[in-house]
Every structure is written in structure tokens, then in C-alpha cells.
Image (cartoon, helix red, strand yellow):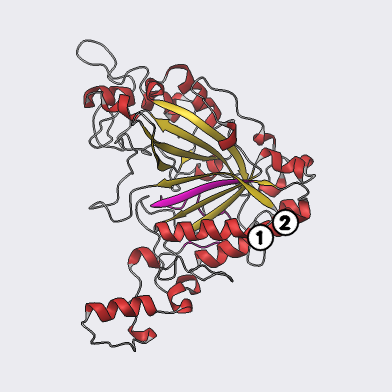
Amino acid sequence: MTGANDSQDTSRPEDSPALSGPDAGGFSRRRLLGTAGAAGLAVGAAGGVLGGSATREETPALATVGSSAVAFHGRHQPGITTPLQAAGHLAAFDLAPGADRKAAAALLRRWSRTAQALMAGRPTADDTGVALDAGPSSLTVTFGFGRTFFGRTGLEKQRPLALDPLPDFSSDALDPKRSNGDLWVQIGSNDALVAFHALRALQKDTGDTARLRWQMNGFNRAPGATSHPMTARNLMGQVDGTKNPKPTEKNFAQRIFVPSGGEPSWMAHGSYAVVRRIRMLLDDWEKLPVGKQEQVIGRRKSDGAPLTGGTETTPMDLEKRDASGGIVIPADAHARISAPEANGGAAMLRRPFSFHDGFDGDGTPDAGLLFIAWQADPYRGFVPVQRKLDRGDALSRFIRHEASGLFAVPGGCAPGEYVGQRLLEG
């Protein structure tokens, strides 16, 4: 829970959808695949006034959520600075025995072609029709490479030092079958069917080249669910993401993206994603009175403001003391320990999804956070903050890290290119 894209508007609050109008990107799927579903709804609503002859001009425009599109091409890959999406899927794949660098390049070429089409609201060649009636709904698809990918493709010399294995932490209870992987895919959308459609299309694209290693499903609050844009809450009910770096900050790109002159050169404008499945021990957490929960976090539950007062965005006064002389924000409060000012400025862009995968036999919910943190260097972002949290975070009693992955996510691609081309053909 620790937590400037040329292709996207990153100045919106994170719960606001990226609006680009119903004709953005040359979609829509409904126009290309037919309008029978929309026409049928119109007939039912109008008592047969339209009959069965509704034309494309009579088809209602897509609603705001459906019409929003995110550009596939750009300096950075989509899905990093894109505002939080309502539905998401994370998946890791391992290359099949015998699949080499050439096969991997062909797979990334297929994946990029599919992602570009779906993000623009266009169907794939063998489209299943799952998202037939919807627009792109802010769909994003992001691709990354795990540490083991480089050995299996003969590209060891191109493996970044930043992909060295993450250290062990005391709160880890990691399942190796749900961790790491050669290739990583992140899918997000503001419509769950659009997100699933993309997942299925990319899975089919793998053919005999790669095999699914693990897959996780997530969700967030839907755009428009609140009276005004607000920072999202996690399943503990806490406002989560207040201290996220903002694209408007002067050093945002320096913290989140690899510079153009960085090493290796193929990672220019890319980022590193730390992925953790963090289970929340909700039964234990929910037994705490709200006041105790606020002491664990260091912020008010009602509005996310620090215990030292103000609003959500008011800086924490880490030195403030109460009438008895004790510090107002406890020494082991999560917000204190994870604060950039308490970690030499170390920061990462947290862009999570919540998850719920049912209940254990005793009724305990298998739920929590699919933690995704973006940074230019995980050993200057995630690792120092997590080490400090590992030594004394009050929240650690209520969470368990059950899966982990670290992936190199290259920069975006230009029209006519595919993601990872500079690595695979360089």
C-alpha cells in the first residue's frame, strides 16, 4: 500500500474519465459491427415507433464513459498516468519451450496491433462480440518484461540492473506460482466487459508462443459515482493515494520515467512496475474502532485529512504534539513512515486495483489490493519505502503480501512500431 505523458491528459483528477468524444480514435465498435442491440433498445423504449429500420444516424451517441478513449501511441505507454479505471486485469505469461527472440517479437507485434485496435474501439479480426455495443471506455493495455524474459530470448546483456530480484520482507508470504513471469500485461477500462474483451483477445494472440502463468482481476470506484472527483478508497475504507506524485510537479517525470539517456537505452521513457497482491485482513481491521484505525493510518477516515488537521491535501505536521506532549501522528502510523519527506524524497506513482476473490472456508474474505507502483528505479522508489514499512508500520498487522512481481515497462511506440521493438530488434 506504499505506494509527463505526451499521449494523455494527466491533469484531470484521478476519478475523472479521459474524454475525447464519440469519434475519437476512429471507433466505434458499434458502428463497425452493427447497431442491432442499440436499435432494439430504442424500439422497446419508444413502443415500436422506430420499427425495425433504425439507421446509423438514429443510433444514440455513446454515453460519456463509453466514448472516452486513450491514445495507444505516445512517448510513454498508456495505463501509467491514465486516471484510475473501474475494472482491470493483470496477467503474466511465460514463453513456451522453444520460443525464441523472433517468436517473442512476433507476439509483441500481435499484442500491439490488438491493443491499438481495441483502445480505439475497433474490433479484432476474429472479434468475439463481447464488447459489441460499447466504445473504448478508456481502455488501456500496458506491456512489460520480467527478469527471466532476457535469458530465454538470449538478451541477457540488455537486462536492466533495476530488474534484480526484490529483497525479502518480513510481511511477505509469497506464492511463487502467482509471482513474476516472463511477460506482464496490465489492462484497465471503465467498463468491465471491455476490459474482459481485451484480456481474452490478448490471451488468444499468444497462440503457442506463451503460456499463462497467473492472472488477477481488480476493480475501482466507477467514474461519476461521487458528486465530484475524489481520491479513491480502498477496501479498508481509507482514502488511498493522497500523496501520489502529480504530473504537474516539476520532478514527476524524473521520479517515474527512465530518462532518454538512461541505461539500457531501450528503456528510454519507460518505467518499472512493482506488482504486489496485498491481502487485507478485513475481519481484524473492521473490529478496530474508527479512532484506532485512524491512529494506524495517521489520517482521518472521513476525508483523508492528516490527524494534525486541515483537508486531505494539507501537509502532515509530523512534529505536532497534543496537550499531553505526545506526537499527534503516531511514530508507527502508515502515513508517517511512507511519507516521501520521511524517506529522503523516495516516491512512486501508486495506481492500484482492489480485488475480491471470494471467501475462505471459515468465511474470511480473500480481498485486498492489487498494488501497482511505477518508478524510474525500484531501488530508489519502492524498496527503501517498503524496507522502512517492514521495520515498524502499524498497518503491517492487518495486511499480508501474497504475490510479487517486478517488470521493465518500455516507453511507448510510434505509429508503425510495436511495444518493445527497440529491445527485440535493437
Task: Report the residue at 32% width, 79% height from top.
Answer: 40
Residue 264 shown left or right of residue 81 in the figure: right
Q: Give the quadrant of the N terminus.
A: top left
Residue placed farthest to the top in the image?
Answer: 324
First in sequence: mark 1 vs mark 2: 2
Within-10-Å neighbours for mark 2: few <14, some 14–19, many 20+ = some
Instruction: Write down the quadrant of residue 367 in the picture.
Output: top left
Residue 153 shown left or right of residue 370 in the figure: right
Return the residue at label 1: 418
**Amino acid at dot 1:** Tyr
Which is the main secondary structure of the residues drawn in magenta? loop
Answer whether labels 1 and 2 touch (C-beta < 8 Å).
yes
Q: Secondary structure at mark 2?
A: helix
Task: Report the residue at 58% width, 58% height from top.
Answer: 202
Query: Within the magenta stretch, is there residue 91?
Result: yes
Task: Report the residue at 36% width, 38% height from top.
Answer: 242
Measuring from the top left, give residue 258's x and y in whole percent: 61, 44
Q: Which residues are magenta?
A: 70-93
- Camera-nearest residue between 192 and 245: 192
Res. 247 visible in picture: yes
